[in-house]
Amino acid sequence: MIEADFRGRLGGFDLSARFTVPGRGITALFGPSGCGKTSVLRGMAGLMRLPGSRLAVNGEVWQEGRRFLPPHRRAIGYVFQEASLFPHLSVEQNLRFGLRRSGGAARIGMEEVIGLLGIAPLLDRPTAMLSGGERQRIAIGRALLSQPRLLLMDEPLSALDRFSKDEILPYLERLHAALSIPVLYVSHDITEVERLADTLVLMEAGRVRAAGPIADLLADPSLPLIRMPNPAAVVDGRVVATDPAYGLSEVEVPGGRLMVPGDLGAPGTRCRLRIPASDVSLGRGMPEDTTILNALPARIEGAEQGPGHQMTVRLSLGDQGGGAAILSGISRLSWDRLALRPGDLVVARLKAVALAHPDP
Ligand SMILES: Nc1ncnc2c1ncn2[C@@H]1O[C@H](COP(=O)(O)OP(=O)(O)OP(=O)(O)O)[C@@H](O)[C@H]1O
């Protein structure tokens, strides 16, 4: 468990951010520019001392009252927007520097980090000859080798172009699946957050608006996330079968089963799916003669007015609802034509279902 309570004035900015999140998995700190995300991370690292604040990480109190562990006594790895590697050292030497810093017995070894981050072909390169995405992978590797009890990542992908981002995201997903170190991940890119995070801390003007499992917060009508452009739901499931002939996996989620492209692993493998609202349409009955693979019964839980004349409909999967929460983006005209209302039982047709990341 990570218990954080940071409060104080930073120039003219009032920070009062309190949250408790699980001590494992990825927690995203998400919110608009200037809402205080980096300040919270700096507080956690001990780089900023705000009296009256508190931080406990998996039972160890790092700050409380007069107790204040300085940064070097906190077992943290910190990854910044732009990797600050030592230019005169090779990739391998940069990584070894991380390993040295840890001092004691290594829980995460060189080999493991090299394998997880696909670094082997880069080891002998001077750092000046790396792409932005490669540099960031080395920075992450170096942070991991310092044997952190908490990994802090401040918009690690924001300085990268779309191509490099897409290249590095699968590595982050692999780290997430393989390591048990809790990660606090600052981002203002909700798609990134949907792919990576288990837990979301939603910040607004120095305060925590909500904190909890990401699937719950994305579908919460009282929060602004559902009114953002292109909202999406994330749903956790379990592989029940694979169909190599058609390159599909069947995934059981609360309230139904979905066919998902790709081989997602042996039966029992857990996975997370991302379902954009724009890929879900609604009907009164089961569709016939359609190319859509996934049509599932669902109940309408509510609907929000989206931008323009769009509606974002909240659904729960299952014959009588009650299963996983998903969203559907439809026009107000369709809503009126089908006379849809909260409580109605409908069929949700999912045009695309993509894997968000393996092993939630
Ligand atoms: N040491 C400081 N002195 C004065 N003001 C500060 C200090 N640190 C942060 N601030 C102010 O606190 C506010 C929050 O900044 P912070 O960098 O934490 O936000 P953020 O959510 O991370 O923003 P971004 O997404 O743009 O990086 C800003 O208005 C910033 O100017």
Image (cartoon, rainbow, N blue to C red):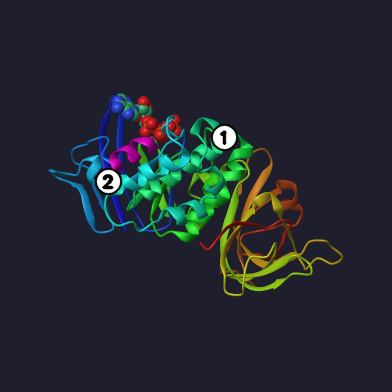
Q: Residue furthest top?
A: 11
Report whether residue 218 is seen.
Answer: no
Q: Earlier in the sequence, mark 1 or mark 2?
A: 2
Residue at left offset 55%, top offset 32%: 129
Q: Nearer the viewer, residue 285 or 90?
A: 90
Locate residue 317 relative to residue 212 in the image: left or right.
right
Task: Identify the residue position indicated by label 2 in the image.
Answer: 5
Which quadrant of the render holds ligand 1? top left
Disc 2 is placed on an element classified as strand
Residue at image coords 57%, 51%: 170
The quarter of the picture where residue 167 lies is: top right
Residue 32: x and y in percent read 47, 35
Q: In front here: 192 or 310?
A: 192
Q: Is residue 354 found inside the magenta-colored segment of the image?
A: no
Q: Amino acid at mark 2?
A: Asp
Q: Locate residue 189, reporting x and y percent.
A: 53, 40
Mark 1 surroundings within 10 Å by alpha-carbon count, few (fewer than 14), some (14 through 19), many (20 or more): few
Residue 121 percent location from the top left of the image: 57, 46
Q: Between residue 91 and residue 132, name the one nearer to us.
A: 91
* Disc 1 residue type (three-letter): Ser
> Could you tell whether 328 is left or right of 78 in the image?
right
Looking at the image, the residue that sits furthest to the left is 66
Whether residue 42 appears in magenta in the rendering, the answer is yes
Residue stretch rendered in magenta on the structure: 35-45
Q: Residue at x 45, y 35 (%)?
A: 83
> For mark 1, what is the residue?
131
Q: Main secondary structure of the magenta part?
A: helix
Q: Is disc 2's CB within 8 Å of ligand 1?
A: no
Mark 1 vs mark 2, CA separation in Å: 37 Å
Q: Is residue 112 above or below residue 249?
A: above
Q: Measured from the top left, where is residue 45 in percent x and y?
A: 30, 41
Looking at the image, the residue that sits furthest to the right is: 289
